[in-house]
Amino acid sequence: MSGRAAVRVAKRAALYTAAVAFTVFAVFPFYWMFLTAFKQNRDLYVGATNLQHVPWIFNDPPTLDHVRLLFFNTPYLVWVKNTALVGAAVVAITLVVAVPAGYSLARLAGRWGERLGIGIFLTYLVPPTLLFIPFARVISVLGLQNQLGALVLVYPTFTIPFCTWLMMGFFRAVPRDLEEQAMIDGYSRLAVIGKVVLPLAVPGMLTVVIFAFTLVLQEFVYALTFISQVERMTLSLGVPVALVRGDVFYWGSLMAACLITSLPIAVLYSSFIDRFIAGLTAGAVKG
Amino acid sequence: MATLTQPPATEEPTALGYVETRGLSKHFGDVRAVDGVDLCVMEGEFVVLLGPSGCGKTTLMRMIAGLEKPTAGEIYIAGERVDDDVPPRARGIAMVFQSYALYPHKTAFQNIAFPLEAAQVERSTLRRKVQWAAALFGLDRLLDRRPRQLSGGERQRVALARAVVRDPKVFLLDEPLSNLDAKLRAMARFELKQLQRQLGTTTIYVTHDQVEAMGLGDRIAVMDKGKIRQIGTPRDVYDNPADTFVATFLGSPPMNLVEQDEHTLVGFRPEHFLPREVFGEEPDLVTFRLRVREVEYLGSDRLAYGYLEEERRSDQPVIAAVPITITAPLAEGEVYEFAVRRRDLRFFDARTGLRKPAPR
Ligand SMILES: Nc1ncnc2c1ncn2[C@@H]1O[C@H](COP(=O)(O)OP(=O)(O)O)[C@@H](O)[C@H]1O
Ligand SMILES: [Mg+2]
């Protein structure tokens, strides 16, 4: 009796230990970001010379100096605006293309749908470090150098394949019976898509929005290639370019920028987490 | 009417049946799912398509619904030819899928209202009609629920309510009861029959369950391998099967088939095959000696499995269904005299399996 109870307690303990370890692992970068963003320079840069110094707490009172530098001495807010603009445009383009494409691949192309889908996914795997060379030529022919338009044009080349593939999975999970029933109930195929298929694919579209936006947010190589003027940069490029000067890293402001940028994303993810997970596992659950 | 918009018929005579198929076929690659089906359903009739799984029932129904394009053949609904380019929504049919196909994002009310919205029925009429259909199936209290909050039986009734709500020309029902448990199924069968009588809507009903087919159908069409083997009233197909397939598919246990000579099979139903003494002095009996191998006690009957001790022995076991009211001894390993009335014998061609008249 007590032996079994002991085993149960041990199992619980192991489970919680693992969960806590993983949480610490996941949260630590954020904590470090937070510390660095608000530490005084005196507190920040002593670790290597003074072994008595404890790095993972505030030894001096926190300060807003780094945040102030970020907001008043760099065009941080302009980068935020640029990123939001590019992100919104890319998300819109991606939805407009990936949703119908995913539907056609899932339903209309029959056997070939799957192969085409895999083919499209493979194009997503071609690295930007190869593609930026031909793209540079295209962008210069179009006269889009140093313009946000260049990014709006280039980013969909990787968001669309990935999101098409995602949407294909979501549409597959919508039972065909439902569409046929709706066609019998008096609707054309187009009306059926609008009234039955799309409402059921909302978690999928939400997933696409989040994925496309996150991809834009983290993209660096294309931004570096096509944008040279600081006021036209997006966050992922502007922050390192303006806050790493030669070999001087403005660590406090860098981390402040990362923290402020990642907060809204974290809030967005956690508020949609249920639908998001439902989306990622759509194929596995049956209506 | 839609018929006015059609060019005047030049070659096609108007169909006689309310739903009619002529030489209807559907091939998937090498598979002949439906193979030259001529089916004629009268207005208001309840016809059941019965056959083993994979015989093409669903495919036939889907072609009538317009969800599948025929490889060959013609389909008429209410005298109008529809097989070519009339989409499902314009065929005036309502279909209930085996899966019920309820829209998971809509409440029961919205599910039932969905076909009415397509027809742009006015709001107050829509409300009234949905309530009428819901009352018909006892769904009044469940209208706010979503499909996942409903039990299997309730889902099935929502699907039926959605089918009846817009007054279709034809109901197409594909195994609508097969997902219900046995107890519910008997009730649902009764209710369905009542409803069809009440509404008088022409109905085609697919099932692989012979009890359902016998109970529901005005007529039964027995299908096998994409072909209709026989169409007739339940009594007709049971008593006078057109071939050995129908004879052995209907009835539980199935009809016994015994080789009479190299050209002829003789068939008789287990319930007609009884101990000799039961018949007393009756004339026109055919007697067999049966060596009993196994006796099953089923409550209302005893089933005796055995082999005939005649010169025309069958390798197939022969089954006798002896009502429990007959107390004649039946012991395993013993040989007994059994008999069948001559008029209960059916004869089939040994090669083609087709019914043939009694010899002599
Ligand atoms: N879309 C399809 N593609 C290929 N074969 C099919 C398709 N639909 C049905 N079949 C085949 O046609 C035959 C009849 O199927 P079906 O009409 O579903 O039979 P039933 O409803 O009587 O069980 C089966 O052999 C099935 O495998
Ligand atoms: Mg079927």
Image (cartoon, rainbow, N blue to C red):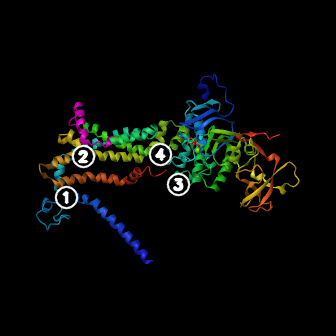
Q: Which residue is mark 1?
A: A36
Q: Are marks 3 and 2 in contact (CB under 8 Å)?
A: no
Report whether residue A89 is seen.
Answer: no
Which contiguous range is marked in magenta? A123-148
Q: Which residue is mark 2?
A: A80
* Chain label for disc 2: A
- Marks 4 and 2 share the same chain: yes
- Of residues A171 and A227, the one nearer the viewer is A171
* Chain label for disc 3: B
The amino acid on which the numbered mark 1 sits, given as a three-letter code, is Thr
- Marks 4 and 1 share the same chain: yes
User: Which element carries disc 4, helix, strand or loop?
Assistant: loop
Q: Position of residue A262 (x, y in %)?
A: 27, 52
Q: Which residue is mark 3?
A: B149
The amino acid on which the numbered mark 2 sits, given as a three-letter code, is Val
Give the class, few, some or many, for how many residues have Cα within 10 Å of label 4's Cα (few <14, many ≥20): many
Give the class, few, some or many, for how many residues have Cα within 10 Å of label 2's Cα (few <14, many ≥20): some
User: Which element carries disc 1, helix, strand or loop?
Assistant: helix
Indicate the quadrant where residue A100 lies.
top left
